[in-house]
Image (tube, rainbow, N blue to C red):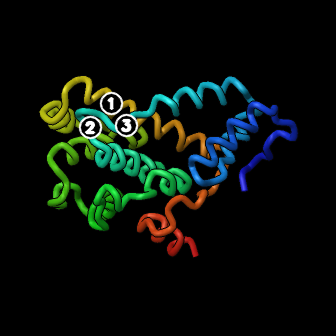
């Protein structure tokens, strides 16, 4: 249950759009309703979401999913972990790789990560620290693996997911049930009981 209630009155157009989004997503998205308290935030959030990169000529779906999962795990955002980990198997993300995202094992020790994935994930881990602590050698490895445009996609993906982690945590929105078998969520559920 979120910290605040959704508005009592929602316009027909807003209801229609929210229902369409929820049907597409396959779950109730409480955040869409809560943002209607401040329509400017709802509009800017919708625009941000519509511009998220899901596949790119330089950065494939698997790497984008890994980056999203890494940011969600680093922020300890249950909703975001749930959403960004859904269908992790379709991108051939292994349990060992998830343990590396959780920082239980070193990224460098996971042989199934490519050099490009290791560079992006190491950068993502350092960028999501508070305060950020990006090391020069991490930037060098990132530059070896990505073009400037590719780095911009990595950074903007981290920022977009970070935006949503703060939004979900700020409103107290629980997981929506996108990924019932994700090892990260199972670990969280078991440790909180």
Q: Which residue is mark 3?
A: 132
- The answer to whether any part of residue 170 appears in the image is yes
Residue drawn at x 28%, y 60% is 92
Of the numbered discs 3 and 1, the one sitting upstream in the chain is: 3
Q: Which residue is mark 1?
A: 153
Q: Position of residue 14 (x, y in %)?
A: 74, 33
CA separation in Å, label 3 and label 1: 18 Å
Q: Do the numbered discs 3 and 2 sit on residues whose CB atoms are within 8 Å? A: no
Q: Position of residue 188 (x, y in %)?
A: 50, 67
Local crowd at mark 1 within 10 Å, few (<14), some, or many (≥20)? some
CA separation in Å, label 3 and label 2: 23 Å
Q: Quadrant of the N terminus?
A: bottom right
**Disc number for residue 138:** none
**Disc number for residue 59:** 2
- Indicate the secondary structure of the residue bearing disc 1: helix
Among the 4 quarters of the image, the one containing residue 130: top left
Circle nearer the viewer, 3 or 2: 2
Foreground residue among 8 and 1: 8
């Amino acid at each position: 249950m979120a910290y605040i209630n959704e508005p009592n009155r929602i316009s027909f157009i807003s209801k229609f759009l929210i229902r369409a989004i929820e049907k597409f997503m396959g779950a109730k998205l409480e955040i869409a309703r809560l943002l209607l308290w401040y329509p400017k935030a709802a509009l800017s959030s919708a625009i941000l979401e519509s511009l998220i990169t899901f596949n790119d000529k330089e950065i494939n779906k698997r790497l984008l999913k890994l980056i999203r999962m890494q940011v969600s795990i680093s922020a300890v955002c249950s909703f975001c972990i749930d959403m960004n980990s859904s269908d992790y198997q379709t991108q051939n993300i292994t349990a060992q790789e998830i343990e590396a995202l959780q920082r239980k094992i070193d990224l460098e020790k996971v042989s199934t990560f490519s050099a490009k994935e290791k560079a992006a994930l190491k950068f993502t881990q350092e960028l999501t620290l508070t305060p950020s602590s990006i090391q020069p050698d991490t930037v060098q490895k990132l530059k070896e693996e990505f073009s400037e445009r590719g780095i911009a996609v990595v950074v903007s993906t981290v920022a977009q997911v970070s935006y949503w982690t703060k939004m979900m945590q700020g409103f107290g929105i629980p997981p929506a049930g996108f990924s019932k078998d994700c090892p990260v969520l199972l670990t969280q559920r078991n440790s909180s009981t």
